[in-house]
Amino acid sequence: MNINASIALSNGPPVSLNFFQKLGATLGTIGLLILFISLTSFQLSPTSVWLVLALTALASGIVIYAWGLYGRRSAGIQNDGVWFKSSSNRGLLAWISGIALTAFYILLYFYPEVLGLREGDNVGIIALFDPLSQLLSGNPASQWFVYGALYTLCIAFFGVKFYWKYRHNRYQKLRTLSVIFFQTAFAFLIPEFMARLNSDGFSLPYYDLKNIWPLNYYNFYGYRVDEFISAGSIGTAMLIFGVVSILVITPLLTYFYGKRWYCSWVCGCGGLAETAGDPYRHLSDKSLSAWKVERWVIHLVLVFVVVMTAAVVYSFLHDDPSKYWLGPDAFLIALSCLLSLVFALVWIFRRNELKSDVRIAAPAILLVILGLVGIHYLFDQRLFYFDPYKLREWYGFLIGAVFSGVIGVGFYPLLGSRVWCRFGCPMAAILGMQQRFFSRFRITTNGGQCISCGNCSTYCEMGIDVKAYAQKGQNIVRSSCVGCGICSAVCPRGVLKLENKADTGASRYAEKPITFGNGEVKLNP
Amino acid sequence: MKKERVVIIGNGVAGITTARHLRKRSDASITVISAESKHFFSRTALMYIYMGHMRYEDTKPYSDDFWVKNRIDLLQASVQQVITEKKQLILQDERIIPYDKLVLATGSKTATYGWKGMELEGVQGLYSLQDLRQMELNTQGVKQAVVVGGGLIGVEMAEMLHSRGIQVKFLIREDRFWGSVLPQEEGNLIGRHLSKEGIELRYQTELDEILGDRRVTGIKTESGETIACDFLGICTGVKPNVAFLKDSGIKIDRGILVDEYLQTNLPDIYAVGDCAQLIQPQSGRKAIEAVWYVGKMMGEVLGATLSGQKTKYQPGQWFNSAKFFHIEYQTYGEVPSKPIPGMASLYWEDEKQEKAIRLVYEEASEKLLGLHTLGIRLKHEQCDEWLNSEIRLTKLIPNLQLANFDPEFYKDPFPDIQHAFNTYLSRSES
């Protein structure tokens, strides 16, 4: 009997919702409906009551739905029917939610006036959030406040859902508490409270301290640097913290723990992906071609952000040199030295780990950047040829808005939850290089116990073909791995373990024998 | 010179591992024939397709272009006959495939025991992709199922049915789950876990007759009880899939008889995996071991042999693993299901009855013979080293943590285990 296996086997039974799921879904819909009505000309008043109603309905809807889904099931892996549900198998529901999310992002980034943003008194959904904003910072809401509030609500309450789903797994629980905490405190509340401290003579920039450059690509723009400096010693300390974050704290923590310390314990983008995005993690593309695209795109975004930031910083240092302690030339020399140093370290210590295309591309890009700096001085050309403010505008539009928001989150239900983190985030690119070349973190595999079932690869949100390593007995040392730990959780044979024990140098990358004791066979000739 | 033509029948883990390891070392022409599927998939993952965790394509260990890149030809066809004198295979469509060397990796079939009513609709085993498809069709609209056979496939099938909201009654011949392998305490622990999940276990119950006209409506047990069901899973074990070799001249007992080089009685014909029966198995090991890992190891060895590097099959320490609903199981070395004179064991179970460990040792010397765990992940390499070095209990117990492979932040069960074992040992000494 011959069958075309891929067709017949994916038709599961209809999946029905239980009472709590229906109740949760209803409440959630009511919450969304209130938000939607607020967008129309229909006036909801008093706004504070409607806001509380909407947020309560959303939050309780999510929690009750989660209870219906996992509450009465015993603790363990809960992936039954994932590929049967229209919401998680790119079915109709997935398309509807994908389109709705994308539309929301387009309004948010490009048409905030549709959401109700006004010079004077806000209207629409932004007016609905005014009472909360007033309560926290004393200012009226903006589209970013609405976004931040909904974003935090999603991480917190989908976080509860995730916590429930993985309640047998302490790594998952702690990680989830951590992202909920960092989002609520650092990304949402602290900046709002900081705004309260502002007075006429004193103003701190709106600063989410855990949002590190280059993810926070505007952190070193001239206006922000000016804000930092004008806020006295606190502001200066924050500016220094911003620099130290990327140059010192990040490499150190990544050396000891891998990029996961940021990507799946702290970061807000990661936080949303791990909580609200969790039902879509299996949709990531695992093909080799996707990996090839990923390597080029993410590193080119990194080059883009470095060049853009350098151009912007150089330009404001240059335009008003008396204002800053750092001169424009010193800045360019320091930057060139830093880039050369990073390149030299990788080239000297990890050259064998570089693929052939990287051995050409990396020196080429470095030479182009250094060459452009040289041309700038030798021939008195504009640095990098482009108007820095045009570069900045393009980066903000293409990467900051379209890539990270519209595609990154809007396409969750279709492309999986980590599209931005995998293909676009320059912070992830830096952390990834550190993780790949100078870190103790790796996922170790357990001898010959792998049965190649494919659960690890399927549920890897970063599209890493984990089993390709596991079935060879090779450590997983990949720059894209965010250390979410789900591969280890779903493995039915106890094969995978996230570890950051002492660095074992070159053997960290080696293929080890798998089926121990199997006679005289050299297993990986 | 013409390239040597190696033909492998069967694209499961044994056949494919043979092909891969041969390709690593040799330029021979390699053809893999399978009636089941064009591409290699992970048989152990079939359950996850049914449960909706994965799609069929997710269970393929290698992407489809792997085979082209590695010049391994895949042929989806059914082999009818092996003409050993002419070194030819005859396919169902009467095509003739010549070979220089032949590898038989035909796997298993569900073993049945001549029950009346086996032919009824809704009655089936679970081994192949075709079985899985059958099960998909057979369980449409089903409310109550019976699964016969308290072993690995039985518990998988129970979990699969349970995931679709189907009531499962699980018939087990012994007085505990998987009694032929698990000692009493472990069998009981898993039994309790299954009951808690909502599976109805019937111990010491055997199938006698299958009831129904066209479709199964129930079964009769050997004690005469009738149990209604609209699906019956037969999970009473597997047997080598060798029927088509009957008149080929290849010697067959239960499986295809092979020597330590995995060669059959005929030159240039080899057998690996579930279908192979070792004439002289290593001491403590069975002649037929129908598990994934054995297929993989045999494939590694035969791949080397076929390339001219003649290699004996010496599988080393036994290991295996499984998952029973939410509880993982790993075993290393020898852990007998019933007490054996001269052997003793230490057993620990946590309060929630979700974790357990057993250390089996030689009573006189206190040398470690085997260990297994439920709900605790162990490091294969470490266990293998302990078994090879015949570590003594007194040295092992303080170092048990070395084998901990549980995820980070999990509660470390070993202090409790060590305390319990040390207390027991010091009491029995005094």
Image: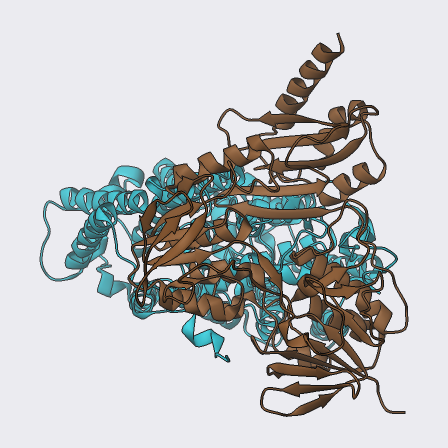
Chain colours: A cyan, B brown
Q: Name the image quarter holding residue A245.
A: top right
Residue B175 screen position, x and y as percent: 50, 36
Residue A59 screen position, x and y as percent: 27, 44
Q: Is residue A351 left or right of residue A444?
A: right
The residue positioned 76% from the left and 11% from the top of the image is B429
The answer to whether residue A190 is seen in the rendering is no
Residue A478 screen position, x and y as percent: 66, 58
Q: Residue furthest top?
A: B430
Where B291 falls versus A396 (above or below)?
above
Q: Is residue B163 left or right of residue A175?
A: left
Count the marks: how many? 0
The answer to whether residue A359 is seen in the rendering is yes
Quarter of the image with the C terminus of chain A is: bottom right
Residue A476 screen position, x and y as percent: 68, 55
Which of the two residues, A277 or B390, is positioned nearer the viewer here? B390
Which of the two residues, B389 or B93, is positioned nearer the viewer here? B93
The residue positioned 54% from the left and 57% from the top of the image is A455
Which of the two residues, B292 or A307, is positioned nearer the viewer here? B292
Which of the two residues, A391 or A418, is positioned nearer the viewer here? A418
Q: Name the image quarter holding residue A193.
A: top left
The residue positioned 68% from the left and 14% from the top of the image is B423
